[in-house]
Amino acid sequence: MPRVTFTQINDIVMRQLSNNQSRLAKLQEQLSSGKALNRPSDAPIDVVNDLELRSSISHRGQNMRNSENGGTYLTVLDSTMMGFDDLFQRTRELALQGANDTLLPRDRQYVNNEVRQVMLQMVNLANSSYKGDYLFSGTDTDKAPYSVLSGNCDFDTLATDPSDPAYVAAPQTFQIFDRNATDAISTPSLNGNPEVRRLIPGTVTIANLVEGTDYTVDYVQGTVTFLTAAADAEAAAGTLNMSFDWVRRNELPNENGVINREVERGIIMQINVKANDVFGSETEMDAFSSVITLMQGLHTSTQAEIESSITNLDTSFRRILGQQATVGSWFNRMESTLDRNQENITISTDLQSQLEDLDFAKAISDFTLADSIYQASLKSASKVLTATLMDYI
Amino acid sequence: MSLFEGLSVGNRGLSASQLAINVTGQNISNANTEGYSRKRLGTVADYREDGAFGQMGFGVDVRYIERVRNIFIDRQLNTQLSDKGYTESIDYSYERLENIHQEPGDTGITQAMDEFWNAWSDLANNPGDKSSREALKSTATVMTERFHYTAAEIRSYKLSINDQIAQQVEKINDIATKISELNGVIMNAEGLDTQNANDSRDLRDQLLKELSDIVKVSTVEDERGAVTVTLSGSMLVSPGNVYKLETVRESITEADGFKFSFYTMRFEGASESTTAQGGRLKALFDARDEIIPKYENELNAMAETFVTKINENHVTGYSLYHMTGIEFFDSTKISASNIKISAALEEDSNNIAASVGGNLTPVTSHPVIRLAGSDLIDLTNVATGGNVMFRNVASGSMKLIRQSDGREMLEGADKDYVLDYESGRIRFNPASAATPIVNETYEVTFKYNDSGFSGVGDGRNAIKISMLRDAKLMDADSFGNYTHTVSEFFSGYIGRLGVERNQAASELETQKSLVEQLSGQQQEISGVNLDEEMSNLIRYQHCYQASARFIRTIGDMLEVLMTI
């Protein structure tokens, strides 16, 4: 039988008590922090998984934010384009009204005024912005795509002297150029300035000359054709001055720029539409030009023009509808991505919680058990430590 | 045998019992003394040659007081104590390292990194917005600060270990000196064969135990009782001498320029350093030289990757001011302790290059003429007379020099001229002190984007950088391909820390139980059992009483003789 000394007994008792105490302390730490994993050594593999899950949840959360942001953008875009739909409907109605051949030119002018108001509303819509960024400007989001400007033209390049080799007898047609353009990057025209297009019918005036008799205007192209010698006379006198309003398509270097959102890991989605796709490019009959053809017809009271403008309006309308369909499909895709991300986050959070969070029921029962063991060890220690032969001698 | 002999026998019995009780008393008093081994009387029955009976008993002979001790268990225990000291110290180091990192949690590096990547994505959603830029700048700053904190805490722990090394070496010297003194005492006291310097030996054994905890040593006792203590093959204590250790400072400069004095250990007068082979001291050296630097290096590798990879992608992008070549992080600071956002970013968050596009081209000494009657000049090409206009001139890149007097015109609304960056047009200030003259020739040096800046709303560079979150940037394999993303690397780092801690902790548990077992065995042999001593006390007391009785009996018998 091995010899047992008091020191040994003491050591054993102390060791066991301290083991029990440290077990209790660990459970207590878990209970008060609510976490099963308080430090890497608690369960290293779990900690690695936990950290990776946390990062994944954070990433997906960001993707969700991006999707929501994108979704809102697309919603705003969609409602803007629906606004256009309404305006085009209205324009069509007015066109049909104006096409009624019982109307007098004066009546048609009244219709024209209404159409002008609608067109100005269209320009406003085209310049819509979301959180301060223009929707249709590509990545030049700080610049509006369209402007309505007032202009002046002196026709000082008109050759008026018959001996001038450039002189051409009436009728002469002249293109108006925008000398104030500071962004002359288009095809070089007169000294590098871009053409003026989309004059607004009803706003053009030339002093002392009569439209229709002395001159005609092609409002869409921005050209003026002088018909009579009276115009030449005015030019010679240097008093030829035209004032007009026009709709300018601002030259934006990055109008085709793409705005993206990272909606899922590694997947980026475009959310913006190009102005050319919505309104048409400068080389085709764009949305505003189509309205101007109607206005031209109403202004000059030309039945044929009014009727043919309806075709233009329809083309513009369909163009916008097409883009709306694209935006709609993007929106659906964005929504489903949002759902997927949300589901993924829920699953990951659940997994992470299983790893990291404490199972309270189990921990409390473990704690109770450890506590009773501790109490038992204290009690038995007290018995063992106090018994000695000296009590009996 | 005569009666007087009997008296002598009784006497001897009395003194033997007395001695025995003294020894018992000594054991009882020292029951709780650290390192005390119980003493026992070594008695032998004495005899003398007798003609009639051959050997005749002559009482009890107390030969020696022996110390009950097993030196083999002592040696084993000391070895295990060294190992336990080592693992305990290592376990503590890992515990410290773990606590510094605060993972998993919301205040660690993982969280800061996740928010950093998120902020890039938010910037991509709104590149023109000042608040997203400021948020990115702020999350980047928080992340660098977390790196700093972790690196600084690790470093400060390393420095404290360095100090502890010096302390432990001093302690070793102290113990060695005491052992040597005890060697002297024991050698003197144990002149004859039966004399034991028991208490000095106890003291010396206790000192050896303390020494083993600090550093692994081997001991050999010679026939005179002196012990030779050897540390890593060299003598620490010899029968007549002590060879002390000293610490030598070496100056170390770390990668980020931090200097500190680093201790190595050697015997006084030696030229080579000595390495400890076990015990707490070895653990301190291992922690300082291997364990901590390993983690420091990995942390630094992460910081460096952030700096280089993000800068790589950032310098090709364009800021809101149409400039390129801007660093996001200061590229001279690539350690975890000093990683920092660049000065350009610190100054203005608009310098964050969220946009991709542009082709910044430098133009030097370009001649321009100020036209008559105009406050405005276009950056035209005078030589060919064409209309090439330099647009999207990069902010801050323009230098305008008047050729006639070489004077540099200053940019500013209140100075000599104002530049419209997008159109590239220079407008002179009529009130300028430089009095710009019409028809003057100037020379201009600047940088411009001839393909055009890609727009305020372009966040593609920001998206590209935010996607670095999933790019494999760390741990190059043998082909040079990276195998892990930064967050995988870091979670692996933390996992390794946890695993190594657990390993150390379980080794410690094993060591502890080994030490306990051996301690138990030692106690079994050398420890004082009070109950045993109690019963011994009774035994010797009775023996004393009996011897006294015997003497009285002899006395009575003598008296009978005297009264004949």
Image (cartoon, coloured by chain):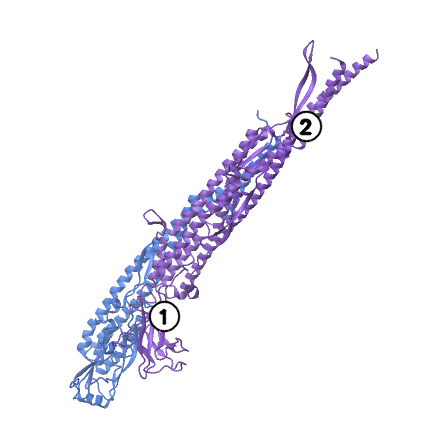
Q: Amino acid at mark 2?
A: Val
Q: Amino acid at mark 1?
A: Ser
Image marks 1 and 2: residues in contact by CB distance under 8 Å = no
Image quarter in which the C terminus of chain B is found? top right
Q: Residue sitting at 47 percent across and 46 percent down?
A: B289
Image side of residue A357 versus residue B522, left or right: left
Where does label 1 land, which residue? B397
Say which element carries label 1: loop
Image height of A260 relative to B523, above or below: below
Specify whether residue A23 is in view: no
Question: What tint does the image give chain B?
Answer: purple
Chain that is coloured blue in the picture: A
Mark 2 residue crowding within 10 angstroms, few (<14) / some (14–19) / many (20+):
some
Image height of A154 relative to B138, above or below: below
Image quarter in which the N terminus of chain B is found? top right
Specify whether residue A113 is in view: yes
Residue B265 percent coordinates (x, y): 52, 44
Residue B58 percent coordinates (x, y): 70, 16
Is residue B522 or residue B541 the one in the foreground? B522
Image side of residue A28 versus residue B186, left or right: left
What mark, if any, has residue B323 been given in the picture? none
- Rendered image quadrant of residue B120: bottom left
Image side of residue A291 versus residue B299, left or right: left
Label 1 resides on the chain identified as B
Determine the CA span between mark 1 and mark 2.
98 Å
Q: Residue furthest top?
A: B52
Residue A374 percent coordinates (x, y): 56, 38
Where does label 2 land, which residue? B23
Mark 1 residue crowding within 10 angstroms, few (<14) / some (14–19) / many (20+):
few
- Rendered image quadrant of residue B228: top right
Is residue B265 or residue A77 the one in the foreground? B265
**Number of numbered labels in the structure image:** 2
